[in-house]
Image (tube, rainbow, N blue to C red):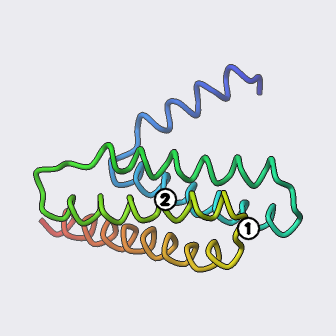
C-alpha cells in the first residue's frame, strides 16, 4: 500500500469515529507516550524522552482546550489537566523518573475511567 493510500485510510478511520472513541484514542496515545518517556529515561535517550513528554503535554493541552465548559465536571477536569501539565514539566526539566512513575498510573486511570464511561454509554444507547 502506498503512503498516500494509507494516509487516506487513516483520515477516513478518524473521521468515522465517535467523540468517545476519539477521546479514548487520545488517552491511549497519552499512556503510550508516557511509557515511551519512561523507557527513554531509563536509557538516557534525552531527545526521545523530551519528545515523548512534549507530546504528552500537547495531548493534555488539547484535551483541556476541547472541554465543554457548560458542564461542572469540566472545571474539575481542567484543574486535573493543569496538574498533569505542571507535573510533566517537572518530569522533563528534572528528568525525574520517580515523578514520572507516580504520574503514569494516574494517566492510565483517567484513560480507564473514560473507557468505562464510553462502554456504559454504548450499553445505555443500545437499551434505549
Q: Closer to the observer: label 2 or label 1?
A: 1
Which residue sits at x=68%, y=52%?
A: 52
Q: Nearer the viewer, residue 41 or 109?
A: 41
Position of 126 with respect to 82 (left or right) is: left
Q: Which mark is residue 83?
A: none
| SS state under label 2 | helix
Which residue sits at x=70%, y=70%?
A: 96
Q: Disc 1 designates what residue?
A: 38
Q: Nearer the viewer, residue 106 or 3?
A: 106
Q: Which mark is residue 27?
A: 2
Residue 3, placed above or below residue 119? above
Which residue sits at x=56%, y=61%?
A: 88
Quarter of the rendering containing residue 8: top right
| SS state under label 1 | helix
Q: CA distance from mark 2 to mark 1?
A: 17 Å
Which residue is situated farthest in the front direction here? 94
Q: Nearer the viewer, residue 82 or 30?
A: 82
Position of 24 with respect to 100 (left or right) is: left
Which residue sits at x=49%, y=76%?
A: 106
Amino acid at each position: 500500500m502506498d503512503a498516500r493510500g494509507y494516509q487516506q485510510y487513516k483520515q477516513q478511520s478518524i473521521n468515522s469515529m465517535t467523540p468517545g472513541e476519539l477521546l479514548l484514542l487520545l488517552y491511549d496515545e497519552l499512556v503510550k507516550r508516557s511509557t515511551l518517556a519512561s523507557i527513554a529515561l531509563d536509557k538516557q535517550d534525552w531527545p526521545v524522552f523530551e519528545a515523548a513528554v512534549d507530546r504528552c503535554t500537547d495531548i493534555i493541552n488539547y484535551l483541556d482546550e476541547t472541554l465543554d465548559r457548560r458542564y461542572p465536571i469540566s472545571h474539575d477536569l481542567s484543574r486535573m489537566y493543569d496538574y498533569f501539565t505542571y507535573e510533566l514539566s517537572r518530569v522533563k526539566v528534572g528528568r525525574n523518573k520517580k515523578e514520572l512513575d507516580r504520574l503514569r498510573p494516574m494517566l492510565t486511570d483517567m484513560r480507564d475511567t473514560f473507557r468505562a464511561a464510553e462502554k456504559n454509554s454504548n450499553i445505555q444507547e443500545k437499551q434505549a
